[in-house]
């Protein structure tokens, strides 16, 4: 069995508005995931919250940068070329 898998999640040329819908959807989905992880950890009184907090902060900053990038592209009538591959590797559990 192959230990690696690559999934082409996004590929193509997009208007800024189309790119925004796709990319903000991905970012918001990850933010929601980490918010649920935080909520779950708090309910269990699990002290391991730092990773999700850091990821949420990073993703919010990325969203702000993306918003500015899209705004600039729209104002200058640019399109986006996006390639988004997900690379997955199976590893043994520790």
Image (spheres, grey):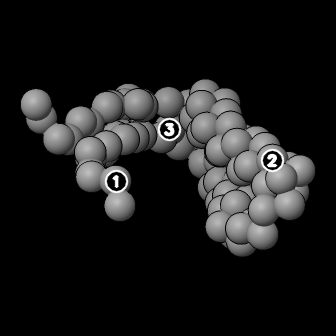
Q: Does 52 sit left or right of 36 as displayed?
A: left
Quick one: 81 or 93, which is closer to the camera? 93
Cα gap from disc 3 to disc 1, whole angstroms: 43 Å
Of badges 3 and 2, nearer the viewer stands 2
Q: Nearer the viewer, residue 74 or 26?
A: 26
* Residue shown at the point (68%, 37%) measured from the top left: 29
Q: Counting residues from the N terminus, which is met first, the one under dot 3 or under dot 1?
A: 3
Q: Is residue 30 above or below residue 2?
A: below
Marks 3 and 2 sit apart, C-alpha to C-alpha, by: 40 Å
Label 2 crowd (10 A; few <14 / some 14-19 / many >=20): few
Residue sitting at x 10%, y 31% = 1
Point out residue 94 in the picture as x, y percentages from the top left corner: 35, 61
Q: Residue furthest left?
A: 1
Q: Is residue 24 left or right of residue 39?
A: left
- Labels 1, 2: front one: 1
Query: In front: 3, or 82?
Result: 3
Query: Do residues under tags 3 and 2 come within 8 Å of each other at their CB atoms?
Result: no
Q: On the image, numbered disc 2 is attached to which residue? A: 40
Disc 1 crowd, CA 10 A, few/some/many (<14, 14-19, 20+):
few
Find disc 1 in the rendering and name its residue.
93
* Whether residue 10 can be seen here: yes
**Image-based side of 16 in relation to 90, left or right:** right
The residue carrying mark 3 is: 79
Does residue 72 appear in the picture of this structure? no
CB contact under 8 Å: marks 3 and 1: no
Q: Residues within 10 Å of mark 3 (few under 14, many from 20)?
A: some
Comparing 27 with 23, the one in front is 27
Mark 3, secondary structure of its residue: loop
Q: Determine the residue positioned at 12% across, 35% down.
A: 2
Q: CA distance from mark 1 to mark 2?
A: 23 Å
Residue at 34% x, 53% y is: 93
SS for dot 1: loop
């Amino acid at each position: 069995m192959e230990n690696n898998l690559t999934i082409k999640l996004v590929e193509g040329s997009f208007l800024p508005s189309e790119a925004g819908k796709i990319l903000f959807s991905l970012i918001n989905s990850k933010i929601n995931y980490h918010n649920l992880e935080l909520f779950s950890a708090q309910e269990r009184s699990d002290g391991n919250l730092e990773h999700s907090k850091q990821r949420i902060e990073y993703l919010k900053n990325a969203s702000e940068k993306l918003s500015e990038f899209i705004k600039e592209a729209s104002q200058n009538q640019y399109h986006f070329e996006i390639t988004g591959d997900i690379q997955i590797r199976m590893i043994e559990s520790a």
